[in-house]
Amino acid sequence: MIELPEFDLYLFDLDDTLINTRQAYTSAQATTIRIAFPDLTGNELAAGLKDLSWLCRIFGSGNPEGYFSAFLASRSDLRRNGKTTVSALTASYRSTFENNLAPLAGTEAYLLALANRKKRMALVSNGVSRSQFKKLQLSGLDAFFPESHCYISESYHPTQKKPSPYMIRRACQETGIDSAQSVFFGNSPEDILAGNLAGVATVLVGDNMELKNDTPDIALPDYQMAGWLDALKG
């Protein structure tokens, strides 16, 4: 259980903080490969999905054309199929991903509780604006975060994306709320570092194994919670 003091401004990361982005795209990748290559089963399927996961990490989860293309290039046995193209895989993946995308358990209840208490809220997210706005719409969270309350890195200089504190500081300035009265929720070291550098309180959502014993103090959160259901108990 986590007990937070009251703040005037509540700032949130999006992916894997409010919505299940990673689970949604890994599940969509697996579904896409199973449908496209039904003969790929057992250990062979597991190995293929492991390779695809690695390629996704290298290309970035927002570039399915890149990692599906590399996956097919690495598998001459699958290319002989002749019917499965990168565009077909990508289309299948995007459709499945969008259907799988959802708020993490307790997210909506927590945001609604803040809204009912008239708290100011804003989104601070790395990514492409069009993609992030679509995720908000698909997950039903756009009601809490209109575009004017969203700070997305594509709109700024590359050096101003998290872990830079720029977007968080800008959110505080534009709402007229002091950083000392603000809190930022994130799920990664980049999130926590950005928040700490901005001078706001920081909350780590989930159990991120990247935050190890050798993590500098400046990247450690002020608070940590397992998830939003944990926060609702506080």
Image: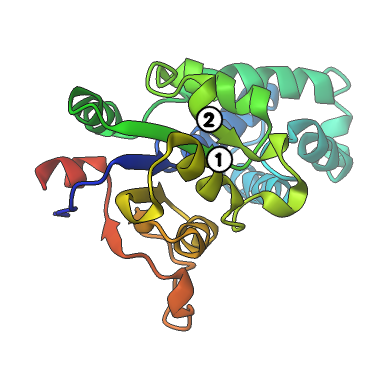
- Residue 125, labelled with which disc? 1
- Is residue 58 in view? no
On the image, which quarter does residue 145 sit in? top left
Three-letter amino acid code at the position of disc 2? Cys
**What is the x, y in percent for residue 137?**
49, 16
Question: Residue lying furthest bottom in this view?
Answer: 214
Image quadrant holding the N terminus, namely: bottom left
- Is residue 42 in view? yes
Q: Which residue is at 64% across, 21% downward? A: 94
Q: Which residue is at 17% across, 54% downward? A: 2
**What is the x, y in percent for residue 140?**
40, 17
Please name which of the two marks, 2 or 1, marks the residue nearer to the observer: 2
Pointer 2 and pointer 1: residues touching (CB < 8 Å)? yes
Q: Which residue is mark 2?
A: 150
Find numbered disc 1 in the image and state the secondary structure of the residue it sits on: strand
Q: Which residue is at 23% across, 33% downward? A: 110
On the image, which quarter does residue 200 sit in? bottom left
Three-letter amino acid code at the position of disc 1? Ser
**What is the x, y in percent for residue 205?**
35, 51
